[in-house]
Each structure stands twice: as C-alpha cells, then as structure tokens.
Image: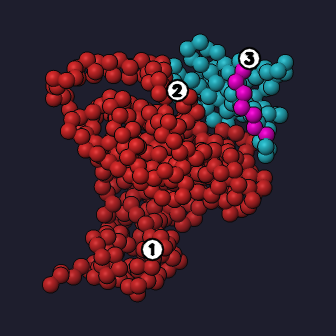
C-alpha cells in the first residue's frame, strides 16, 4: 500500500569524504527508528530557485520518499509504501 | 521518363547506436522503490479507473497490459497491478544522467524522446573499441552509475531507422546489430507492422501494391512503392530499408503549446476558461523564456463523443503577454459550434519570431507591458511557477500539472544540465 503524506521527519545523514557520497542512514518517524537499508534513487529538482533533494530509500519494513529543502535544510516525509497493492 | 533508382544495402560498417530505456517510467519507479521490483506496476496519467496507462512495467506487459490502456482494463488483466502517477522531475533527472553519460562517447548523442537516444560514433575515438563493446560498456555504466535496475535495449546499424528497429528486436536488455551481413535474415523474421511508421493503413496500402512482407518491402522498386504511398514517402522507405540515412533531420521550433486531458466532462465556457487561462500562462511563459513572440494562436478541442474542432488565427501584431494569448484563445473557444462535453483542450502559439524591437503602437505602451511581463516572469522563476497568476486561474492548482510530452523531443530542449 502506498500513502502520500507530508510531515516533517528526522533524518540522520552521513557524508563520506572518500566516495563523496551523501546517504541518509536513519529515518525517525512516528516514534520509531528505521535504519536505511538502501537508497533506490536520489534526484533533485527546483521550485523557483529553491533546490530540493529527493531520496527514495528502503528500510527493512517500509519504503520512504524523503525531501530535503536546501533553503531551510528541513526534511519532509512525502510518501511511505510497503510495495503491495492498494 | 522517370529515372530508375536501384542500389544495394549500405555496405559500410555500422556507426549508429540507438538506445532505448525499457519500460522507462515504470522501470525508474522500480529503481526508486526497490519494493516494486519484479512486480507488475503501471504508471498512469491518473490512478482512477479511467486513467490512461502511459508505462507498464516489463512484468505487467507479460499480463497483456499495454500503453494506452485504461487502468480498469489493466486491473482486469492483472488484478494485483500496482498503479502509480507520473513523477516528471524524476524521469527528467534520469534523462539528464543518461545524457551526461552518453556525452562521454560522442557529442552527437541526440535524444529522440525522454527514453531514447541516438549516438553517431563515426570518427570518434570510442568507435575504435568496436560498436558492440561500446554498447556493452554503456549498459554496464548505466547499471553502475545511474541505477542497477535500469535496462536498455540497444540497436546498432548504418542508419537511424534500422538502429531503432534493432533496439526493438529483443526487449528488454537486447543488443542487436543490423548490417549488410544479416539484414535479410532479420527482415524475414519481421512483419510489416513491426516497422516504426507502418501500421494497419500503410500495411494495407503496401498489400494493395503486392508487398506482404518486409523482404518484399525491401525488394520492391521505388516505382512500386510509389504506387502504394503515392508520395515522396516511397523514396524515403526505399532508402531506409537499404540501410542509407534519410532521417538525419532536425526540425526547428515552429510552435509552443500546452494541452490538458480533462478528468471530468466539462461543457460550459465558465468551467473551461480557468483551464484555458492556465494553459495560456504555461505556453506564454515557455515561449518568452525561449525568447520568442508569436503572431498566431490555435485552439483545438476534442469532445467526449470523439468529434474534434480546431481553429487558428493569424494576428496582425506580435504577442508575448499570456493575457493577450488568453484573449485570443478565449474568443476561439466561444467560436466552437459544438456544445458537447470536452475531453481535451489544447492551445498553441505559432508564427514564432525572435524580435528585439517591436512595432510601436499609439494605442498601447509595449515597452511598459514588456517590463511588467518580464518582472512577473522573474518573480515566478525566483519563487516557483504560478506565484503570480491572473485571478481567472483561481482553483486550477491541481489541473494542467507537470507532464512529459508523449514521444516529444522539443520539450527536451528546455531541460538543462
């Protein structure tokens, strides 16, 4: 099931200076920690001049679509999914 | 007497590579959400039962789900079909990643659509690696650098058309070469409608001229094909099937337009006007950003009863302000003789010019108007589209949303790296 939501969320981000990659490591949502297992895709887009990063990440129980607003460095949880039919 | 045209299949080594991202939108969604991988999914314009499927995944295609099918029909064929709505920003991003990767091989990497590229390696260092090796390397790099779930079908040949045919031979993840050594064998396995550009009507035309197979098509003289097509198309097809290039043409921008498929049947002008206004705002903004002004406006309406009406007007003066485009389009809307619910509304501007100095008018201050429009465009660019909009557009937040043109390549010019 897929659910579109729009709530602020806590995200732990890791930057690796050797590989020069930034990866979300942990999503804290609804009083639970979800360690990120893999990043499916990372892309960016602009709304006006504001740059947004979208991280599509998978955890052991749920998929999360996370949005980082580079203007205020705030994270928003946009979507969750368990990959099953609605 | 007409000069006879007769030449054999192009003997040169293939240098053109056609690359096609398999089930593009659906595969990208599966790349982003690993939980969808291996499952039948479909990206549809709307996830409602009447929504049109624009991209079924490879798994959904096995159930018979095809492009253009309604969501309700797709779910009848595949009850556990997962339906998603499009995410244009994500698809454009993948397109740009592809473009960046392919530009390492040649500066002649031309996008043919959001999910198709043609590379001409003639005279480039990469050609020395061998076309098949380059194709394999690109496939591997796509998996490593863009996404491990993404697969592409590659066709290699002596012209663009046969390279595309080659890319369609073994989907997904195919790699096929069509050249002087194997073209007869490949043609013998294809039917006429397998060729891009030949569908039922053209196949009937060819059948009437005694052409029933692709090999017949290849062997037919230009005169025979002229009897079938009755136009220059006969010559084009003759050249294409003989492996020579005829499609290396790019058409310049001739119009800017936007269209909207109405999710519910609207009939009254008052209901259609806000949508028309949003369409003209989008069209005007894109046209001005590219530095054009227009001297013509066109409106096309498709109705629910499958009837169609369209009208275009040429204007005495150039227009650039979306409000002026709207005024003309609104007049056209009122001219429509049909009074039945609409299915699709499309507006476009034509007779484009890049004009630095507009003809001054006694009645209107163009300079003032241009400054105002530029200021509004700058604000919208800074804070996001539609921050400042005409009042008539109120209530249109969820209509005419961002879309990727079907098979279009013109809008790709507007994507920048």
> Residue B201 at what x, y percent from top left?
45, 74
Q: Label 1: which residue?
A: B201
> Residue B152 at what x, y percent from top left?
56, 53
Q: Label 3: which residue?
A: A10
Res B275 seen here: no
Q: Nearer the viewer, mark 1 or mark 3?
A: 1
Which disc number belongs to residue B394? 2
Q: What SS does tag 3 mark?
A: strand
Query: Is residue A5 found inside the magenta-colored segment of the image?
Result: yes
Question: Quick one: which chain is red?
Answer: B
Pick whichever, B352 or A27, lies toward us. Answer: B352
> Residue B246 at what x, y percent from top left?
31, 63
Pick whichever, B241 or B60, lies toward us. Answer: B60
Describe the colour scheme in one phrase: by chain
Going by the image, does B299 lie left or right of B302? left
Question: Quick one: which chain is cyan?
Answer: A
Same chain for labels 1 and 3? Say yes or no.
Answer: no
Q: Is residue B76 above or below residue B36?
A: below
Q: Which residues, given as a range, are shown in magenta?
A: A1-7
Which residue is at a point 30% across and 51% down the rendered structure image? Answer: B251
Which residue is at a point 66% across and 38% down the rendered structure image? Answer: B32
Going by the image, does A39 lie left or right of B411? right
Figure quadrant of the C terminus of chain B: top left
Pick whichever, A17 or A44, lies toward us. Answer: A44
Pick whichever, B28 or B272, lies toward us. Answer: B272
């Amino acid at each position: 099931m897929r659910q579109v939501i729009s709530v602020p969320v806590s995200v732990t981000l890791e930057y690796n200076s050797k590989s020069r990659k930034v990866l979300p490591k942990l999503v804290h949502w609804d009083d639970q920690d979800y360690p990120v297992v893999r990043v499916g895709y990372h892309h960016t887009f602009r709304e006006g001049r504001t740059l947004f990063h979208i991280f599509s990440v998978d955890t052991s129980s749920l998929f999360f679509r996370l949005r980082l607003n580079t203007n205020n460095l705030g994270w928003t949880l946009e979507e969750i999914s368990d990959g099953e039919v609605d | 007497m007409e000069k006879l045209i007769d030449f054999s299949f192009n003997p040169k080594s293939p240098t053109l590579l056609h690359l096609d991202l398999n089930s593009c939108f659906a595969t990208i969604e599966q790349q982003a959400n690993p939980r969808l991988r291996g499952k039948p999914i479909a990206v549809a314009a709307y996830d409602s039962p009447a929504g049109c499927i624009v991209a079924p995944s490879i798994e959904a295609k096995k159930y018979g789900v095809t492009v253009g099918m309604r969501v309700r029909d797709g779910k009848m064929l595949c009850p556990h079909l997962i339906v998603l709505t499009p995410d244009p920003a994500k698809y454009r991003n993948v397109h740009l990643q592809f473009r960046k990767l392919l530009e390492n091989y040649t500066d002649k990497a031309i996008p043919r659509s959001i999910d198709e590229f043609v590379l001409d390696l003639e005279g480039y260092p990469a050609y020395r690696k061998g076309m098949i090796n380059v194709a394999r390397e690109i496939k591997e790099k796509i998996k490593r650098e863009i996404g491990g779930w993404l697969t592409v079908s590659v066709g290699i040949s002596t012209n663009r058309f046969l390279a595309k045919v080659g890319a369609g031979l073994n989907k997904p993840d195919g790699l096929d070469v069509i050249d002087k050594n194997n073209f007869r064998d490949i043609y013998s396995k294809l039917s006429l409608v397998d060729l891009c550009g030949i569908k039922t009507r053209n196949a009937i035309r060819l059948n009437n001229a005694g052409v029933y197979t692709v090999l017949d098509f290849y062997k037919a003289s230009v005169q025979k094909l002229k009897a079938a097509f009755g136009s220059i198309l006969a010559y084009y097809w003759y050249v294409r099937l003989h492996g020579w290039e005829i499609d290396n043409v790019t058409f310049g921008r001739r119009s800017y337009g936007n269209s909207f498929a109405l999710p519910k049947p609207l009939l009254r002008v008052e209901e259609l006007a806000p949508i028309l206004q949003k369409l003209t705002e989008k069209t005007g903004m894109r046209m001005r950003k590219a530095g054009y002004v227009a001297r013509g406006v066109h409106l096309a309406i498709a109705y629910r009863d499958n009837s169609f009406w369209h009208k275009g007007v040429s204007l005495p003066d150039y227009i650039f302000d979306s409000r002026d485009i709207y005024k003309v389009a609104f007049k056209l809307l009122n001219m429509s003789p049909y009074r039945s619910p609409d299915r699709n509304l499309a507006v476009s501007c034509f007779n484009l010019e890049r004009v630095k100095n507009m003809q001054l008018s006694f009645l209107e201050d163009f300079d003032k108007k241009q400054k105002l429009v530029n200021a509004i465009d700058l604000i919208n660019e800074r804070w996001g589209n539609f921050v400042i909009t005409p009042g008539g557009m109120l209530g249109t937040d969820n209509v005419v949303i961002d879309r990727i043109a079907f098979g279009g390549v013109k809008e790709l010019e507007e994507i920048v790296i």
